[in-house]
Image: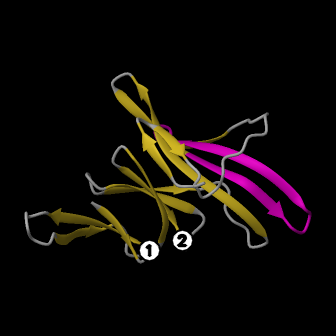
Amino acid sequence: MIAMIDYNLYLMKVTLVVNENPFIECKGKLNKQNKISQVFHCDGLLLCVLDDDDTKAIVWNPYWCQTRCLEFRYFHRPYRRDMFSYALGYEDKGSCRSYKFLRFIDQCVDYKTIDEFLWYEIYDFDSSLWKTLDITQHWRILCHQPGVSLKGNTYCWRWA
């Protein structure tokens, strides 16, 4: 089990015994230097959005105890109110999977120039490259909505 406690991710072992309280043991911690604000799961990988560093995210594979740092091409500016959202998924390529990370600004408002724009980009884990999506139609994904990844696709929902 993965637990987020005080901006940190922990790998936990939970032992259930009939008619007894569960026994919980901490098996490991992701990173001691960074605070984590959001976590997205896909196929065993965890995408960790950092609370104290808006220039990168960390992808953690708890099974292999490996991490990968993803440097963003664009990050928050103090004078802007950017609304970033994230999704983690994959596409099947024959017998292997190609993982992708979608990062988008649903709304970016610069109050000095009253400018608003939408921006979408995908990080490809195979090539380690970012690609900006050329979106010609206006479409929106509501920011900061809970979501779940199923068979490589991320689904978001809105509470009514």
Q: Is residue 102 above or below residue 7?
A: above
Residue 66 x/y as whole percent? 32, 55
Find the residue positioned furthest to the top.
Answer: 94
Tell me which segment is drawn in magenta. 102-128
Left or right, residue 126 beside residue 86: left
Residue type at mark 1 is Tyr
CA distance separating discs 2 and 1 = 8 Å
Secondary-structure class at tag 2: loop
- Residue assigned mark 1: 7
Magenta-drawn stretch contains 16: no
User: Tag on residue 51?
Assistant: 2
Q: Are marks 2 and 1 in contact (CB under 8 Å)?
A: yes
**x 55%, y 61%: residue:** 56
Q: Is residue 69 above or below residue 93?
A: below
- The image quarter containing residue 129 is top right
Count of number-bearing discs? 2
- The image quarter containing residue 53 is bottom right
- The image quarter containing residue 28 is bottom left
**x 45%, y 73%: residue:** 34
Magenta highlight: main SS: strand
Which quadrant is the N terminus positioned in? bottom left
Secondary-structure class at tag 1: loop
Magenta-drawn stretch contains 106: yes
**x 7%, y 63%: residue:** 18
Left or right, residue 76 beside residue 101: right
- CA neighbours of label 2 inside 10 A, class few (<14), some (14 to 19), many (20+): few
- CA neighbours of label 1 inside 10 A, class few (<14), some (14 to 19), many (20+): some
Find the residue positioned furthest to the right.
Answer: 113
